[in-house]
Image: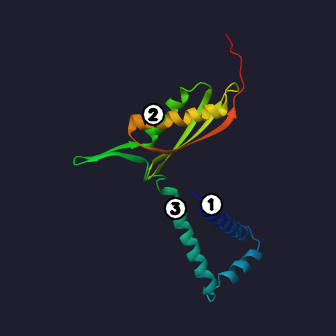
Amino acid sequence: MGPFDRTLLAIYAVFLTLIFLLFSSVMLGWTAPLYLLRDLFYPGRSEVFWPLMLILIFAGIRLLWVAVRRPGGKDRHVILAESALGQVNISLQAIESLVVKVVGQVNGIREVKPKIVSDPQGVGIQVRAVVTPDINIPEVSSEIQQRIKERVFEVTGVTVSSVKVFIENIAAHRPRVE
C-alpha cells in the first residue's frame, strides 16, 4: 500500500468515524448534530451531497481494490530460456535462497536478508547483513558482491546487474554455554 492509499484510508476512516459519532450522538438524544446533518444533507442541497457520496464511493472502491489485489503478482520470476517448446522460468524466491546460501558461506556473516529486483539487464540484488566485529567490512562486502555475481550466473545463467550490500549491524560476541 503506497502513501496515496494510506492517506486515502486515513481520511476515509476519519470521515466515517465522524459520521458514526454524529449519528450515535443523535441516537442518544443530543439534537445539535441532528440540525448539522439535516442542513448538510438537505434534499435541496444536492451540490454538497452527491459530490461527497461520489468521492466516498470511489475511495471505498479504490481501498477495496488495494486490499484484494495480489501484491507483486507480475515480475516475480525471470525467464531463463525460451525455445520452440516454451519458456524456462526461475522464481525470484529461488534466487533469494541461493543468495542466502552463498552469503552464509562467507566468514564473519551472522545474518542475511536478500531482496531481488527484476530488471531488463537481469536482476539487481540487495543484501542486508549482520557481521561479526572481527572482520574487515569493505573486504567482506566486496567478497559478498563477487561471490553473489559469480554464483548466481553460474547456477541460473541470469546476469546480475548490481549487488548492493548493506551492513545493518555488527553482532557482539556471546560466549558459548556448554
Residue designated by label 1: 3
Residue 150 lies, in percent from the top left, at 46, 35
Q: Nearer the viewer, residue 22 or 105?
A: 105
- Residue count near mark 1 (Cα–Cα under 10 Å), binned few <14, some 14–19, many ≥20: few
Residue matched to label 2: 151
Q: Say which amino acid is labelled 3.
A: Leu
Q: Residue at x 71, y 20 (%)?
A: 174
Which of disc 3 and disc 2 is earlier in sequence? 3
Type of amino acid under label 1: Pro
Above or below, comparing residue 53 to residue 170 in the picture: below
**Residue 74 placement, left or right of 105:** left
Report the Cα–Cα distance between label 1 and label 2.
37 Å
User: Gap in Å between the C-alphas at discs 3 and 1?
Assistant: 16 Å
Q: Pinpoint residue 57: horizontal percent, then vertical percent.
A: 54, 71
* Residue in the picture at 52% in, 57% down: 67
* Circle number at residue 168: none
Give the structural element (helix, strand or loop) at label 1: helix
Q: Nearer the viewer, residue 84 or 72?
A: 84
Residue 177 image position (x, y, % from top left): 69, 13
- Counting residues from the start of the chain, the first of labels 1 and 2 encountered is 1
Within 10 angstroms of label 3, few (less than 14), some, or many (20 or more) residues? Answer: few
Q: Secondary structure at mark 2?
A: helix
**Residue 64's disc number:** 3
116 left or right, relative to 153: right
